[in-house]
Image (cartoon, rainbow, N blue to C red):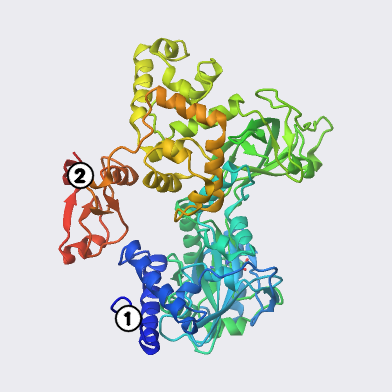
Amino acid sequence: MVAGEAMKNDQAEKRVVELRKEIEYHNYQYYVKNDPVISDFEFDQLLKELETLEKQFPDLITPDSPTQRVGGEPLSEFQTVMHKVAMLSLDNTYNYDELREFDKRVKKKIDVHEYVVEPKIDGASVALWYGKGMFLRGATRGDGVRGDDITANLKTIRSIPLHVQSGRLQTFEARGEVYFPISGFKELNTAQEKEGGQGFANPRNAAAGSLRLLDPRIVASRPLDIFVYYLSYSEQIFQTHAEAISALREAGFRVNPLIKTVSDIEGVIQYCQELEEKREDLDYEIDGVVVKVNALAQQDELGSTIKHPRWAIAFKFAAKQATTILKDIGVQVGRTGRLTPVAVLEPVQVGGVMVSRATLHNFDELKRKDIRIGDTVLVERSGDVIPQVVKAIAEKRTGGEKTLRVPKICPICHTPVVRKAGEVAINCPNRMCPARLKWRLRHYASRDAMDIEHLGESTIDKLIDAGLVDNIADLYRLIVSDVMRLEGFKEKSAENLIASITQSTQQSLSRLIYGLGIRHVGKYAAQLLAREYPSIDALAVVSAEELKTIFGLGEKTAEAIASFFATEEHRQLIAALEDLGVSTERKIVVETLPLAGKKFVFTGGLSAMSRSDASEHVKERGGLVINSVSKDLDFLVVGENPGSKLAKAEKLGITILTEEEFLKLLK
Ligand code: IVH
């Protein structure tokens, strides 16, 4: 359309329909198939075009438009809804003999030929109701009869189709498990803890907690995902569960790739063994295997008790839990000054990993759970995070156990602690507390920040404990003979450390901004800022109001940045860094860099460096690393065992580089 020319309503409608179809297709390729066919940029363009048209022609907005995934205003509460079909739970077993007994029970009634075996996803179960192919309503399990209407939150999960793609399913109910990927869970917890907040205990709580948020915009910012595993109602008739699962997959749902059909109970048991071994490699938590009779007529014949179906059973893996003695409770001071009790344990194996420390979260919880030094405690490991103490086993007490007193002073700098009204957290208010300084320096020296190679955690501790470093700037004042005084350092290692510190003076502006540890400023925000402002000095004088206008920067972040630079101590730090030769300016205009504007995609494993290092090299040279192969890609870098991207790139005639050629290009 020519700019300025008004589009007619029917033209607009046609385009809107086209766009929606296209966007949902790319959504599906990206979130369900994990195989995008256009770049993020192109996708955003399509979405923007649709948004613009819908703004111009609001009558054309429908609830299943991709623009409606993130709903408007927060809710004040959830509506209660009756489930179309009661959400039963599953009978559990913990050993293979019980599985064989289940098989016997089933065989008494029917001549079973096949079982379907599936990972038991550890998240929050939901029911999704579709009418005429449109996603109409989604609900939590609740008590099985009534649940909460969480449609707005579920719409934010991109792998839930707002409209089924095609095929047999039109009016139906699907069940699935919403889960929090482990990688995303770790990130969320780190971010929340950095803010001085409380992380979730495990990915399941994070999933369930996120679904219960009243503001869909916050839900949308979390990487929730879903596996759909059951067709609980359908107008269409199917013969088997496996067929129903295929229909769900064809309709555009995300179905677990490890679902399998086996011919007898020994096949089930073998699957359980194999899956337990794979358990640690998955990016989602599973707590067992669900076994289902495949033939739907046989399922009907077996029926259900009031609690659970007789045609299915859950084999639960041994919990990643163990009991041990709580030898002591230490107190840790975090980056924001927050004090956390830490359990010192008699070492014990938990789910195959030796554990000697566990988190106790906070002092209120310690009191509430009445956990005492000397107690026998139950320890749990989940979601790959620090293990936690679940509870004390009170029956095992001998009388000699001691309760920990809530500290009144910081264990590190002895400053009296503070507790803000209404908050659980106890904080050391001393900004110069060595414990906090250690965190600040660790962050500053970390790989994503200033990447100071020889400045690891223990060296930082030694430097601070020896009184050689009181703030970030002091790093640049160190000389070789200072470092040689530290335990474990000789001339060569001291020189190496000083050399890597000196090298860091030339790091990029975005790394420096990130390294300063400004609240809410992650890597991405730091890059935005470095693109917007040519130097730290330029950034330091910008008002919160102006910062808020930067696209992609949140309000809280804008305020945190302004307040950081308003603090005298921080101004002094910047001035000192400049005096000591740390570059605080953006270095080269991006356009003049050797790979300026060139787009790269990687496929297969690289041997000389990690994918993220390779991306970093490209970015440093002005290039762009994108996800998917399309005709405007410049280079596909092919490592070992390349994926389908190689064939696609060959078809499009894109320049293909071996790893060796790529390294040459970098040089
Ligand atoms: S089937 C009527 N399949 O486990 C049968 N459930 O303890 C419906 N779950 O409430 C359940 N993965 O939240 C089924 N592959 C799977 C599952 C699964 C996880 C959850 C679900 C259910 C609970 C039962």
Q: Which residue is mark 2?
A: 594
Which label number is shown at residue 266? none
Name the foreground residue: 577 vs 408: 577
Quadrant holding ligand 1?
A: bottom right
What is the x, y in percent for residue 551?
Answer: 44, 56
- Upstream in sequence: badge 1 or badge 2: 1
Q: Which residue is mark 1?
A: 5
Whether the residue under disc 2 has CB within 8 Å of ligand 1: no
Which is more toward the observer, 613 or 66? 66
* Secondary element at tag 1: loop
Relative to residue 548, is residue 18 drawn left or right? Answer: left
Q: Residue at x 20, y 54 (%)?
A: 635
The quadrant the C terminus occupies is top left
Looking at the image, residue 151 sits to the left or right of residue 406; the answer is left
State the SS at label 2.
Answer: loop
Quarter of the image where one finds residue 11: bottom left
In this picture, residue 81 sits left or right of residue 441: right
Counting every numbered tag in the picture gives 2
Q: Nearer the viewer, mark 1 or mark 2?
A: 1
Please state which amino acid type lies under the numbered disc 2: Pro
Quadrant housing the N terminus: bottom left
Q: Mark 1: which amino acid? A: Glu
Instruction: Work out whether residue 392 can be spotted.
Output: no
From the top left corner, tell me how far across and down residue 392 is, in percent.
75, 42
| Residue at 17% in and 55% down | 656
Query: Quick one: label 2, few (<14), some, or many (20+) residues within 10 Å?
Result: some
Q: Is residue 666 visible?
A: yes
Task: Kindly report the distance in space between the C-alpha atoms of the residues bearing marks 1 and 2.
Answer: 41 Å
